[in-house]
Amino acid sequence: MHDHVNWLRHASPYINAHRDCTFVVMLPGEGVAHPNFGNIVHDLVLLHSLGVRLVLVHGSRPQIEMRLGERGLTPRYQHNLRITDGPTLECVIDAVGQLRIAIEARLSMDMARSPMQGSRMRVTSGNFVTARPIGVVDGVDYHHTGEVRRIDRKGINRQLDERSIVLLSPLGYSPTGEIFNLACEDVATRAAIDLDADKLLLFGAESGLLDDAGKLVRELRPQQVPAHLQRLGNSYQAELLDAAAEACKAGVRRSHIVSYTEDGALLSELFTRTGNGTLVAQEQFESLREASIEDVGGLMELITPLEDQGVLVRRSREVLEREIEQFSIVEREGLIIACAALYQIADSDFGELACLAVNPAYRHGGRGDELLERIEERARAQGLKTLFVLTTRTAHWFRERGFELSSVDRLPAARASLYNYQRNSQVFEKAL
């Protein structure tokens, strides 16, 4: 119960930030076919109920493949694009039509005791995408395979203003009435750009971009993407990353890649600090990292005023230089705006959180919580079981974050012997 309450409290700033924002969500055909699809629908309904303006773009590749197989037709690709001749187009129209109806049906559910009870949502789809043929490239005729020419921005925004979810299929229409098969990644990217969306959310099989060691890459700038594309080669992961970077370079503030196989991945990415996927963003205004010796000057600028007020214990430059590896910092455009330190208490599995400070101009942005999470992560990684904090001014803040009132008697001898009775700090502890 306590975890749920904490999660909701930590999510509330994001809930407020996302309200009235436009999100374009791309779900490939593999994601629609996956057993987790029902949970993704519930999460989309939740986003809608929290005031997010949603455009959902679906893919259809495996569903088209299945219909081609049933009719004994061989799929043909060139440069990762399907060559859509007449018989293939019939399979595309059949697959996309059935998928669209199935998705609309899922979004229309109002079952008792389900997350969708009382949602009363309207789903709108239509001829919002104008397309043109790719034509003949390097001697290869792509027939009815096309690319997005224009997104009906006014029409979609009108539907979003009326609180509808707009559903876009990977089909486009030409002014002469032709139908074109489109890549859902192309539709989603162009929709995000033309609608000036706040976010483009791309679902893939993996939990985002994985590095060579299989570790999740949390954040990237668009200029860092080409090196990863070279490494990924001709893979779907590369397609997603390329789409995310293209959207960001064209003005979409943030693109996210998350997994359609993992329950709750979308909500974790949107409503927690650590996220659950890969974020591609134009600018990195802030970074949370461990401190190095070059940061001592900036750290002193941050903590000296608080030392003068008696909020923090005074530390000399020499002490800071010696203990710099204990610190984690938040840096914003070259300025250190927040810090915290973790000290392991000798001969124990206890740690002390110390020197938690945030520049007054940057308070109320959740940076203290962010640093606390980082310190707790570091403490667990060191095998520590309990975290102590000594404070004179901010007892309530630590209490709200799971710390309980303790006493000097509970401190290990190595730390108790250094306790300053003149400061009369309150001691709090938290089991990790």
Image: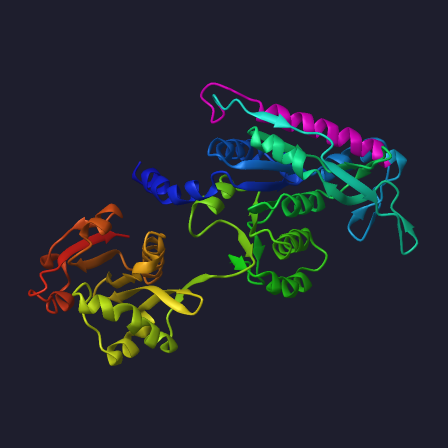
Q: How many marks?
A: 0
Q: In the image, what residue occupies the spot 6% across and 65% down?
A: 422
Give the farthest residue toward the left: 422
Of residues 269 and 331, the one nearer the viewer is: 331
Image location (x, y in percent) of residue 259: 56, 45
Q: Where's the N terminus, which quadrant?
A: top left
Please give left or right for residue 164 compared with residue 401 in the image: right
Query: In the orientation shown, which residue stands out farthest toward the top?
Result: 112
The chief SS type of the magenta part is helix
Please, is residue 167 above or below residue 253 in the view? above
Which residue occupies 20% across, 65% down?
A: 312
Is 416 magenta? The answer is no
Q: Is residue 93 magenta?
A: yes
Q: Position of residue 347 (x, y in %)?
A: 20, 67
Which coloring applies here?
rainbow
Q: In this view of the protein, can residue 339 be seen by the observer?
A: yes
Name the residue nearer the viewer: 90 or 311.
Answer: 311
Task: Find the magenta span and give its range.
Answer: 88-116
The front one of 94 and 296 is 296
Q: Quadrant of residue 25?
A: top right
Q: Nearer the viewer, residue 96 or 57?
A: 57
Is residue 34 found left or right of 335 in the rendered image? right
Q: Residue at the spot x=45%, y=66% of the render?
A: 333
In the rendered structure, the answer to whether residue 178 lies left or right of residue 260 reads right
Residue 63 place in picture, x, y as percent: 73, 34
Q: Is residue 54 above or below residue 304?
A: above
Splitting the image into 4 quarters, where does residue 356 fall?
A: bottom left
